[in-house]
Amino acid sequence: MQLTVPAESDVLTYLASATWDLIRSVVILAVLSAAIFRAVLDFGGRAIVQRWWIERRLNSAAVEALSQGKSGGGLFSLDHRQLCAQISAAAQSDLHDKRTASPLLRAFVGPESIDDLNKLQSTDSDARAKERLSQNVERQIDMFQAFLAQSMSRLTNDSGIAISFGAISLLLALTGTTKYGPLVGATGLLCLIQSLVALGDARIPDSARIRTLRLLVPAIIVVALVLTLAPFIPVDLTPMLLVVISGYSSGMISPIIVTALTRLYAPP
């Protein structure tokens, strides 16, 4: 039996075509996922999750003070940078007017500056104490902004992957071809798992179960790759591997597009 080896040019042509098709699919899915996620944020999603995060870090009195501000509940729908800028302005206003009982101001005063805060309205308070207190408040707000940024980054990654798998499942289902049935079911299940990861992390980010679920999709990719290369597996898992890689890759790329859209539509 004679073994036929494809020509080098044929192999390279096939690899170039397959790679281009994969990249094109990943980019299209990433753009679609980013657009859908950005729409969800703009139509109330950002306000919901940011209120969850703020309630986790601040006490109820501080959250109530934010809700009763000039912006009202709309404050929570702002981008986290704009949100923290509004919080900083409100806290500095309380500090300037020496409203030491303000729950918002007290929420961002570190333990090392409690004495300065208590002396703010006393006769022996000086400018240096007020300056130290102002710097401490700004430092605490910067840490709070970093917390919001990290939370939104994780939510964007998890949601992008979930939306990508959901889009793949929907597009395969719309073809009406029964041979795609297993892929539709698998990607639909992965969409559900990643959705639970995104929502679970937004509510209980320290959960070990959420961290375990986040590692499930990469584990599936590794297992599918190993089984695809294994000669004793009678089932061809290449389509499943390509679909999972496409969905996961596009979900990981979509945060870049979400960030670009946020900067593009951000007010001057």
Image (cartoon, grey):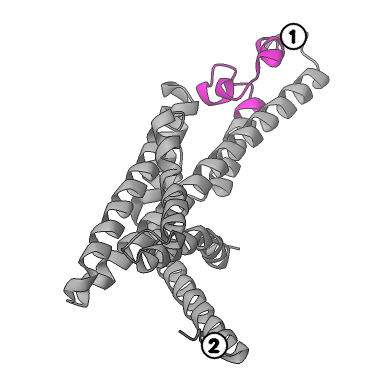
Quick check: can you spot residue 68? no
Looking at numbered disc 1 in the image, what kind of residue is underneath it?
A: Thr
Image: magenta residue range: 94-118
Q: Is residue 129 left or right of residue 79?
A: right
Name the one closer to the observer, 46 or 122: 46
Q: Which residue lies at the image location 47% right of the left edge and 25% below the top edge?
A: 62
Instruction: Decide whether residue 96 is among the magenta residues.
Output: yes
Q: Which residue lies at the image location 67% right of the left edge and 27% below the top edge?
A: 137
Q: Position of residue 57 (x, y in %)?
A: 50, 27
Q: Which residue is mark 1?
A: 123
Quarter residue 11 falls in: bottom right
Quarter of the image that includes the C terminus:
bottom right
Name the one closer to the observer, 197 or 17: 17
- Helix, strand or loop at label 1? It is loop
Name the one closer to the observer, 204 or 264: 204
Q: Which residue lies at the image location 41% right of the left edge and 64% below the top edge?
A: 33
The reply to whether dot 2 and dot 1 touch (C-beta < 8 Å) is no
Quarter residue 214 falls in: top left
N-term mark: 2 or 1: 2
